[in-house]
Amino acid sequence: MTPLVATAVLIAALTHASWNAIAHNISDKLAVFSLIGGGSAAIGVVLAFLTPFPDAAAWPYLVASGVLHVSYMLLLMRSFQLGDFGQMYPIARGTAPLVVTVAAAVFVGESLDSWQTAGVAVASAGLVGLAVWGIRGSGKGGNGGNGGNGGDSSRTASRWPALLAAVATGLSIAAYTVVDGVGVRSAGSPLSYIAWLMILQGGLIPIYALLTRRGRLLPQLRRHAGLGLLGAALSMLSYGLVLWAQTRAALAPVSALRESSIIVGAAIGTIFFKERFGVPRMVAAGLMVVGIGLMLHAG
């Protein structure tokens, strides 16, 4: 991995945590995810006119990835409704590189060296620690998944669904990362793959919102238009940089380095959402980052 590729992935990590924070901060999740999806699709249409059509070999991956991305968005929306940003984000993002590292070895033939194997073990320990601390309860500080008005009993009841939603989000991230890592290499042009992926996956949630909310949707979208469209631009920039990086480096290291966004997400949760991160969460998140660093190590 060259310094240019590493820098691109780190920028992707920063922008990814930022658009996720925007999505978490807006209470109307369907409206904000409609804006993010619709904005991404609109940018994709513009890019499609400026780039060549993807090669035929890429289309099965594009279709599969579109389905996986919609599943990811729905799961992410659910996890943000149920839990703290500072916990849901690290669990969702931390699950992905573990699964991608193993899946890339099994399905793409990218072998694991001893450093990467150790990294999987260390990051897994951090991930389990973060989840266990969430089950025990860490004392929500700000606008947690229950809106701060549910009391201790309702927070306890929501912990398991929140954790399961976050882990499922991570599994969907891992799935589309592997699919896109192979698909973008067969597209002929990374930009054309990005454009058509945004078109395929970006419009489905806005269509669903339009069908379910009808005349109420436009006023709700206007209320959050500025932040929602900013989230769309950050989302597309983030994943576009990752897809480009996947054409220049192995899937597992790119996925692992991208998850440095865990630290950014933890900081955002503490500073902006007033969520009490606490020593146990800090240790668990630190273990995840160390493990991801080991997975990044070139054998």
Image (tube, helix red, strand yellow):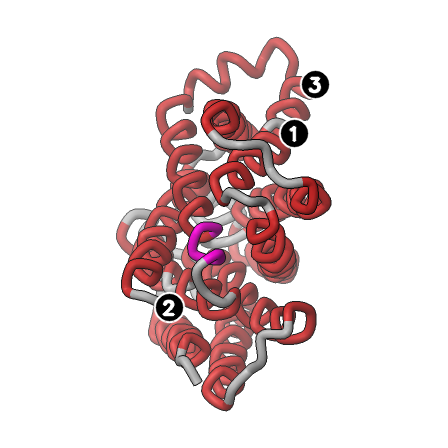
Look at mark 1 in the image and give the residue it sits on.
204
Inspect the magenta stretch and tell me whether residue 268 lies in it: no
Residue 167: x %, y % from top left? 61, 62
Amino acid type assigned to the residue bearing label 3 in the image: Leu
Element at badge 2? loop
Q: Is residue 30 left or right of residue 236?
A: right
Q: Are marks 1 and 3 in contact (CB under 8 Å)?
A: no
Q: Nearer the viewer, residue 240 or 261?
A: 240
Residue 204: x %, y % from top left? 65, 29
The crowd level at tag 1 (other Cα within 10 Å; few <14, some 14-19, many 20+) is some
Element at badge 3? helix
Q: CA distance from mark 1 to mark 3?
A: 11 Å
Please identify the quarter of the rendering in which residue 104 is found: bottom right
Q: Nearer the viewer, residue 108 or 292?
A: 108
Residue at 46 percent of width and 78 percent of height = 295
Q: CA distance from mark 2 to mark 1?
A: 35 Å
Q: CA distance from mark 2 to mark 3?
A: 45 Å
The crowd level at tag 2 (other Cα within 10 Å; few <14, some 14-19, many 20+) is some
Amino acid type assigned to the residue bearing label 1 in the image: Leu
Q: Looking at the picture, does residue 31 appear above or below residue 284?
A: above
Look at mark 2 in the image and give the residue it sits on.
1
Look at mark 3 in the image and give the residue it sits on.
211
The crowd level at tag 3 (other Cα within 10 Å; few <14, some 14-19, many 20+) is few
Residue 205: x %, y % from top left? 62, 30
Highlighted magenta segment, given as a residue range = 243-247
Q: Are marks 2 and 3 in contact (CB under 8 Å)?
A: no
Give the main secondary structure of the magenta stretch: helix
Q: Nearer the viewer, mark 2 or mark 1?
A: 2
Q: Is residue 162 visible?
A: no
Q: Looking at the picture, does residue 142 appear above or below residue 228?
A: below
First in sequence, mark 2 or 1: give its number.
2
Q: Nearer the viewer, mark 2 or mark 3?
A: 2
